[in-house]
Image (cartoon, rainbow, N blue to C red):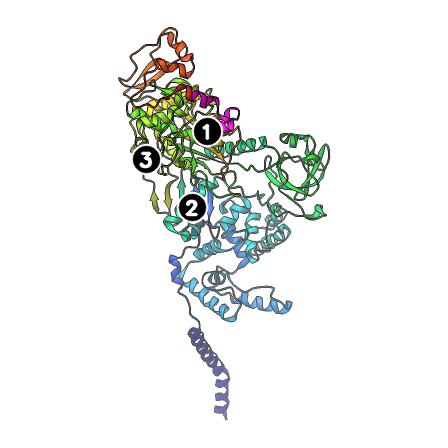
Amino acid sequence: MRFDRLSRGVTLWVLPPLLAALIGGVAGVGFAAVIRMPRVDTLADFRPPLITRLLNAQGEVFSTFARERRVLIEDAEVPELLQQAVLAAEDANFLQHGGVDAQGVLRAILTNALRGRRAQGGSTITMQLARQLFLTPQKRWRRKIEEAFLAVELEKTYSKQQILALYCNLIFLGHGNYGMESAARDYFGKSVGELTLTEAATLAGIPQRPSSYSPYRRPDLVVSRRNYVLRRMREEGFIREEEMETAVAQPLGVVTRPPSRLFAPYFAEEVRKHLEAQYGSEAILDGGLVAETTLEPPIQRAAEEALRDHLLLLDHRRGWRGPIARAGVQELEGYELPAWEAIDTSFGAWNRGIVLSAGTDSAEVRIGDRVYTLDAAGIEWTGASRPDRLLRRGDIAWFEMRGIGAEGDPGRVALQQEPELEGAALVIESATGAVRAMVGGWSFARSKFNRATQAQRQLGSAFKPLVFAAALEMGYTPADTLFDAPVTFPSVPGQPPYSPRNFYRSYHGITTLRRALEDSINVTSVKLLALVGPEEVIDLARRCGISSTLYPYPSLALGAADLVPLEVAAAYATIANQGVYVQPYLIERVIDGDGTAIEEHQPSAHRAMSAEVAYVLTHMLEGVIDRGTGAAAAGLDLDLAGKTGTTDVYGDAWFVGFTPRYTLLSWVGYDVRRSLGRQGTGALAAMPIWQAIVERGLEEGWVSPGERFAPPPGVEFAEVEHGSGLLTAPGARVVVKEAFLAGTAPALRFRPDWNRVLSLPWYQQRSFYLPKAGEAMPEDVEDWELVRDGWEAKDDPQGAAAAAGGGD
């Protein structure tokens, strides 16, 4: 009997634990059989997706590309304050448990049972990390078991500090921010190491429900959640009572999120395309590449603003085209435009607005939840004096912010419209090829087509310097003369003869090469091409980096070929760089996510022309600005050289030139080619952009006043009479200090009777001119006189330009 009692006692005390152990063992074997556990030690090689950053020349980020916006915090860099806030919000027992918090699980079960809903979770930080790294978000019992197993394995393999840092780097915090560092920069404009107590608590509270806890959409919920985290920090002993009370009383303090204003978007896109071609899209979106670029922010800002301001001015001259749309509803006070998700109220910013009313003196315009006043000053550029002549209720248009009034006082706006014109601007450091600024159009949002690198446009007279450079190589000098008069050249088989015309339909007779280039004289330039040989000019263009197709026709001298602005700028940079071509580039170095340099710029350069020829040509191009078509910039305090370009019917306007350090290019035109109108010459439509960039450089110091072009050895100077090219003497009207290759200065001296010769009409000067060997001359003066008098384009400058074949 006693044995039976003892046997029953042993059974009651021993059998249940044995059964539990047996069942647990069987269950463990079963779970192990059905659950495939990933190896957590693979985390040693794990790198979360990182943003690719583009750095400007000062090492500052100006653009990023990413699938998940994330900046990593190293294990030892998670600040103690942020650690405490995260633990208080998510896992107070993190430092004590081994991956699974039994007390936390039990507490969550009891809380959820009492409230009848899922009010609390039992997942630890390690379990959350395991889920994010290895599992799916599906809420199934199997996933929770896998979570627990993985959490234990993570705890056995990695330190608490490593797990917490990985959690802080991976967690999603809304608005595209992955990781605490990215969120800290976005929400508070600072790094995690600079966070205050209230800011750390705010970030720690968001991961629970990032879609709900938006500091911008629901700041009330975020403040409530932040205060909960602060109370938990007090309960856990991380902060004192008075610290909690002070922090709870603080405002949310997130920085205002201005609408995204892309800086140098065309430049950034060129870099992105290169990175994608070299390393693939995955590397750009996830690899954390760092591209150190050549971009100079002050120069880029100058180029962007100069292009934008001048395109707007040109568009304003063409008048108001009307509103961009109309609201299709009657209740305008509650109508919302999609564009109002990002309203920029800073001075000068543009926003779409809806006209609520328009009267004789002013109009009311709603932008977002605020109504602004449009008065007569805001429509002055249109030529109208009354807003109701331009707008009516329901019209949608662009408006420029002109100031926000005080409380109860409406702000003011000005009417605007996007130009139909497009443009491009480039700034290259001539000696290195570094592209310091690139603008590919009016707006990257409107068109991502980069006109600086992708457009192929006729160059007009801006091609002429290459013709003159080839002539200098063959022994011509700036003082040599050709006869500017109507002339005909043979054309390609099956086509009529080619008869170039000067831009303004006037001829000059005896003309020096200097004057021909300064005044952009078409016939003389085509004659020079014929004397030098088109093949020689094409060969020089190739040496200067022109890779686009060039045809050996007479019209090549007038820029009839379609060229890309970047290659044009590089060719001019070759002249500025004393004849050495340097391939333009945008990237100095590329660093991978591990900090290893995987690409470094290697200069590609070669001599395209002698330094002496390059300098003499530069000296001639200085005359374009001193006396020629670029004279608007003659007053600037440094040496400048450049050339205008205008194509037929004013289809493209160019100015390309350089300072002793930088080569600059500006182009204006329509994407679908059509006339810019009578003001669409290179001097009027493109040069103001170029000049504004240089003037901004002088103001800001990145262009040095007083810079001069230094002549190389092998160049000599002589004073010559500008019209004849002869050595100066008493009676000379205009004297210039001319540059020559050593030993090529003229021997003859000017005589006063040359003033009378050069004052004669071109056809009367013929008797005093000895043609060059092979130079085309007018065959019959009387016939050409009849042609000249019979032009239908005589009173039509636009038609005259078409007949002239462009070039100003």
Left or right: residue 534 versus residue 297 is: left
The residue indicated by pointer 2 is: 272
Q: Report the amino acid beneath label 2.
A: Arg
Residue 797 located within the stretch drawn in magenta: yes
Q: Are marks 3 and 2 in contact (CB under 8 Å)?
A: no
Q: Secondary structure at mark 2?
A: helix
Q: Residue 403 placed where, x, y %?
A: 64, 34
How busy is the neighbourhood of tag 3: few (under 14 within 10 Å), some, or many (20 plus)? Answer: some
The quadrant of the rendering that contains the C terminus is: top left
Q: Residue 737 placed where, x, y %?
A: 36, 15
Q: Are marks 2 and 1 in contact (CB under 8 Å)?
A: no
Residue 699 located within the stretch drawn in magenta: no
Q: Nearer the viewer, residue 609 or 155?
A: 609
How busy is the neighbourhood of tag 1: few (under 14 within 10 Å), some, or many (20 plus)? Answer: many
Direction left: furthest residue? 743
Residue 39 in view here:
yes
The residue indicated by pointer 3 is: 542
